[in-house]
Amino acid sequence: MTAVVRCPACGQANRVPAVAAGKRVVCARCKAPLDGGGNTPATLRDADFAQQVGKGDWVVDFWAAWCGPCRMIGPVIEELAGERPSVRFGKLNVDENPNTAARFRVQGIPLLVFLRDGSEVGRVVGAVPKSQIEAEIGRRFGT
C-alpha cells in the first residue's frame, strides 16, 4: 500500500509505502519527518483529501481548535497512530477545510470517520474512550 503524503514543512508530495512499526518516513526534498508514516496522523486538507485517503484503511479525525472534546481525543489518536501501522490516521480541521467537512456531512465534532480505499465504512461521534476506537478499528478493518 502506497500513499501520497504532502510534507508539512516544504509542501513536497511524497510517495509513502506501508511502514513497519518503529520506522519513520522523511520528506525526499527537505528530510523533515512526514505525517502519517505509521507514527503520527497525517494533516489532511480539502485540496488533496481524496488523493490521500484513496487507498488503504484510514481513520480520519474531523476536529477544530476551539473544541475541548477534540483536544481530549487528539492524544488518543496520536497514540493509536503509533500503535497501529496497518491503519493510517489523519486529522482534518473542519474550520480550515469546509468542503470536505460538508461532503461528509459533519454535524458534530470530534468525528472519527473510518475509510477503506476512500469509501466510508463507519463513523463514531464524540470523545470516546480509546478502547471503543480500538474496537471500531477491529470491526471495520479486521485488525
Image (cartoon, rainbow, N blue to C red):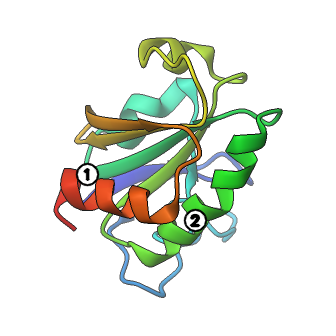
SS category of the residue bearing label 1 = loop
Place of residue 119 in the rendered image (x, y in percent of width and height, measured from the top left)? 24, 32
Residue at the extreme right: 66
55, above or below 141, in the image: above
Place of residue 105 in the rendered image (x, y in percent of width and height, measured from the top left)? 45, 14
Amino acid, disc 1: Gly
102, above or below 87, in the image: above
The residue singled out by tag 1 in the image is 56
Residue at horizontal 30%, vertical 68%?
Answer: 86
3 or 121, nearer to the observer: 121
Q: Earlier in the sequence, mark 1 or mark 2?
A: 2
Is 17 on the left-hand or right-hand side of 37? left
Residue at horizontal 36%, vertical 53%?
Answer: 3
Place of residue 103 in the rendered image (x, y in percent of width and height, measured from the top left)? 43, 14
Residue at horizontal 64%, vertical 35%?
Answer: 63
Crowding around mark 2 (Cα neighbors within 10 Å: few <14, some 14 to 19, many 20+) is: many
Give the quadrant of the N terminus.
bottom left
Q: Quadrant of residue 131?
A: bottom left
Residue at the extreme bottom: 22
Residue at horizontal 55%, vertical 38%?
Answer: 126
| Residue 96 seen in the current view | yes
Q: What's the distance in space between the residues labelled 1 and 2, CA to CA?
A: 16 Å
The residue singled out by tag 2 in the image is 40
| Residue 37 seen in the current view | no
Place of residue 138 in the rendered image (x, y in percent of width and height, measured from the top left)? 24, 62
